[in-house]
Image: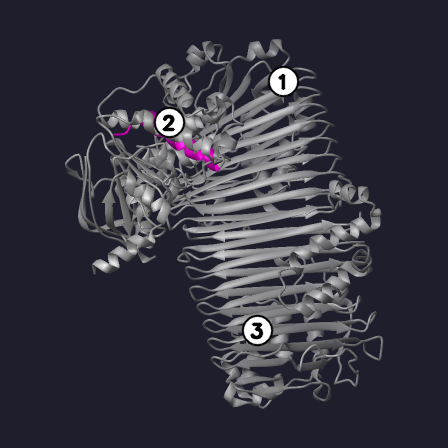
Amino acid sequence: MNIAADQNQSWLEQHTHAPVVGQELEWLKNLRAEALAQFKQSGLPGIRDEQWRHTNLRALKSNLYAHSHGSSTKVSATPNSTTRLVFVNGHFAPEQSSLHESDGITVTDLEQGCRDQSLHLQDHFSSTLPTQQHGFTTLNTAYCHGGYVIYLRSGTQAASVLEMLFINTAQDDDSLTNISHTRNLVVAEANTRCRIIERHQGEDGSVYLHNTITEIIAGENAHIDHYKIQQDSSEAFHIGGVFIEQAANAHVKSHNISLGGLLTRNDICCNLNGEGGHIEMNGLVFGKGRQHVDNHTQVNHLVPHCSSDEHYKCILDDHSRSVFRGRIVVAEDAQLTSADQQNNNLLLSANSEADSKPQLEIYADDVKCSHGATVGQLDPKSLFYLQSRGIDQQSASELLTFAFANQVIDRLEAECVREDLTKLIGGALLHELEDLL
Amino acid sequence: MYKAMTEVAEQNKDLKDLVKREYKEGFVTEIESDTLAPGLDEDVVRLISEKKGEPEFMLEYRLKAFRRWQKMKEPDWAHINYPKIDFQAISYYSAPKALPKLESLDQVDPKLLETYEKLGIPLEEQKMLANVAVDAVFDSVSVRTTFRETLSAAGVIFMPISEAVHEHPELVKKYLSSVVPVQDNYYAALNSAVFSDGSFVFIPKGVRCPMELSTYFRINEMNTGQFERTLIIAEEDAYVSYLEGCTAPQRDENQLHAAVVELIAHEGAEIKYSTVQNWYPGDENGKGGIYNFVTKRGLCKGDNSKISWTQVETGSAITWKYPSVVLQGDNSVGEFYSVALSHNKQQADTGTKMIHMGKNTSSTIISKGISAGHGQNTYRGLVKVLKGADNARNFSQCDSLLMGDRCGAHTFPYIEVQNPSANLEHEATTSKISEDQLFYLMQRGLSAEAAVSMIVNGFCKEVFRELPMEFAVEAQKLLDISLEGAVG
Amino acid sequence: MLSIKNLHASVFDTPILNGIDLQVNAGEVHAIMGPNGSGKSTLANVIAGRPGYEITAGSVEYLGQDIAGLEADERACEGIFLAFQYPVEIPGVSNMAMLKAAINSIRKYRGEAEITAADFLKLIRNKAELVEMKQEFLKRSVNEGFSGGEKKRNEILQMAMLEPKLALLDETDSGLDIDALKIVAQGVNALRGEDRAIVLVTHYQRLLDYIVPDFVHVLSAGKIVKSGDKSLALKLEQEGYSWIEDELQQAS
């Protein structure tokens, strides 16, 4: 047996005592078995895989992982919404959560959701995942033990924001690293509307690996706003996936904000399956320290008359590094597609690094597609302009950095998120300026 | 809107008609050739070296490359599909038979000269007329080099590389594979093992080459892969503009072409390398055509040096080609201008690599892809800024034009930046040929065909502008022929 | 010269014109006016043969020939010119190159010899003066980076170069300041003649102060609802289009 196979075997052994939900469900058991078989074939990805070429997993792989079976960690933050589900180390924490069940809208945790036969989750679970999956995805299917389920029956609209909070902690035994696999499902039938804010947090300095996947199935004319705000511990590994299937005239917005984590990898994929569909993807990375953020996005235009609009901005300070790959595929018959993608990188320090791979793959002829990528630093002319107006260099830099980020922040409709980010990135500076102005 | 779609479909149908055209250069010259039986092993490598009477260092070089090649795998990452190549079914050497040392043009086989005339490069005429020195590579052996005397008066060396091996072994030894190592990639290794001929250019310090240098490549013999090797060295403050044109006769079988071109620009030197590639693209069903796997790389070795690649690629069934510049010297400049047209079943995966190493280096990439019929056109380009490359600048613009609903256009840029003072800008657009533009021109009285030609030439203007005059005219004509019947 | 009978036309399957009758003779200038969306531009584009603009009933005869079967370029070669409302930009194609190709294409159609480079240069310099266009504009790409006014002047220059028999001007006055308007009018008036007809499509009567029409037609909902002389345009200027609607309603 070679080293890689050894490693995969050891990974599986680390999962022998993994807590899983829905073991009594035959369909789920079968899915898990299939996924496990796939994982045994593929194992975890490595830098030899083209899709992981820029993301070294050595540190992640060197840890010895164990599952935490629930935790008493309390959440201090006040909820932004009346509906909030909290997950600690991937386990649902009912005492800290407020569920929602009304007017054809169900918001619950994965375990409950799987048992609720009226939700028919077997039709949706893993249905959005691509045929080619990397090892973290198959592991997630095989071992997910928590997550949220949002089900919107035809014609319903969630009145308030649905807030999902994921908290991860370190293991008590520091020779072990905490691992959790969560799976979230959003099923929106025709003519529905909702806004979901997913927050990922952890006590600073704690080491853990959180592997989380969100599946979004948007029915005809469904309008879904999905926010993923990752503020994990600066030592944490975060592997995430957001997989979206859109029917005709569905409008989905996927916002992906990466602020924390030591190593973050997100795969965000969208299939436009019905005419008139529109996907907006916004991303913001603010890297500091030794953070490594790898965002892989993909939009598949499979039918005519759809549009996609993507803006990813990365601000990189210290030794941080960003990898962006954005792939837009326009299938043979997807005429009258309109697709635009922009990736802008701002390098603030001598040791930061940005890799950008925007990709257009077009098999139809009546299309308008474009992409742009830039890597640069703050414009010296603008800096000088601000300084000549009496703003010191540090503040001028912060202001311009914020202005750069703000081009994405401005696109976010959720006010609470906009405010949080403005505070976080604009920081004290904006306050000061407000006083000045 | 449905109406609009049918209109589009109809237009596409006409487009398809337009795209259909015969390959003009598809004639075979009947000349006795001295061709090796297909197959490749160490003996064949030895035989090639022996046939060329090469010195020992060349044989060693070839054998080393061959051994590396045996251990390598054919790359499969490019966006191209083709049946597996049987490298043992290819003949690795073909030379017109009984080739004596020629003293004058009169001694060249008239049939050969005729071939060149059909290609539109009459050597006789060029001798007097054009300010162009031609080194014609007919299949594998360089037949004739003109203007050598004028050039040598200026101190310029321009000769077949097979001769340079004998006459300037120290230069060949020093520079061969100094930019493209033998193990660089599968095809480069193969080329290093079996290359038959190509051009060798040396411009000494401070010399501005008095004329544009030109080579014509032509694949004639059946089943012969052409593996030419070009090496161009510009010493301090030297300048040279080099033109390369390629054609091949029409054949049903696919022929392999795996060339290696190395450019070295010392301090303050400038090399301009232009290619018009019109190899047989195969018929409309994808039968036949050249497989073109080429490694072209330039090294801006000295400060303030400049290398510029311009290519117009309308031929070949498969094109796999990424002319690159390694910007090692401070303030060095790399440029890549490309027009790639793929129609019928042609597939092109082409682009460039700009590797920024020195300080204040800059690069420009302008790529224009045109896809018609079932053609698949991929731009693949890497811009890499290494740690020490302060103030690197890059601008990339990649535009694709689509004609017909069965073609594809793909853009895969790779941007890797390890220095924060870098400024990179990449823009790409893909769109179909504009119906508004077509209507506008037709309203002014132009036929659909003329309108398409005008729009396409306009689309490619930024690249054509970079070509030397004679080549620009030829390129424009080529594009027109390729698009004959492209819209209605 | 132009005889339109009961013309019904659709734009990408949406019916826009609902029975237009119009007779334009050589030497005449007609103004087509009407509120937004009444079908003015559609009419001009149908005559020029724009793809997607389809005649569903009725006929358009030009010089005694039904032109429904002719492609846009054939119509242009027959002498129909459309000055576009929104002239398209064609990057990389110089104004000069385009015009030379157009002239030669039309000449070829007529069985005439190609224009010599010298004659062409003389001609274009001449005409460029007429619309006060600088030489450098001629070398620039067609309409690329031109201001609104420059684009419209360029249209008139092209018209002057191609010397059409029937000129259709689609909202050529929109977006022009008064000086540009005068230049455009000057160009159009220079073209007026016994053997030519001009159809002006316009929303405002302003242009008609400088190019005085022989006839004014008002288009509403895809039909000509009123025809008259220059005074009709003035009345429209003062009172707007609503009185016509009222009149129509009373009539029905």
Q: Quadrant of residue B436?
A: top left
Mark 3 surroundings within 10 Å by alpha-carbon count, few (fewer than 14), some (14 through 19), many (20 or more): many
Q: Amino acid at mark 3?
A: Glu
Point out the image quarter for the N terminus of chain A.
bottom right
Magenta residues? C148-165
Q: Residue furthest left?
A: C64
Q: Is residue A124 left or right of residue B476?
A: right
Q: Quadrant of residue B380?
A: top right
Image coloring type: one colour
User: Between tags 1 and 3, which lies in front?
Assistant: 3
> What chain does badge 3 belong to?
A
Q: Amino acid at mark 1?
A: Glu
Q: Is residue C93 left or right of residue B40?
A: left
Q: Secondary structure at mark 3?
A: strand
Alpha carbon distance from label 2 to label 3: 66 Å
Q: Is the residue B411 above or below the residue C173 in the image?
A: below
Residue B464 image point, x, y percent: 49, 29
Residue receiving disc 2: C186
Residue receiving disc 3: A215
Q: Nearer the viewer, residue A239 or B95?
A: A239
Question: Within the magenta stretch, is there residue B56?
Answer: no
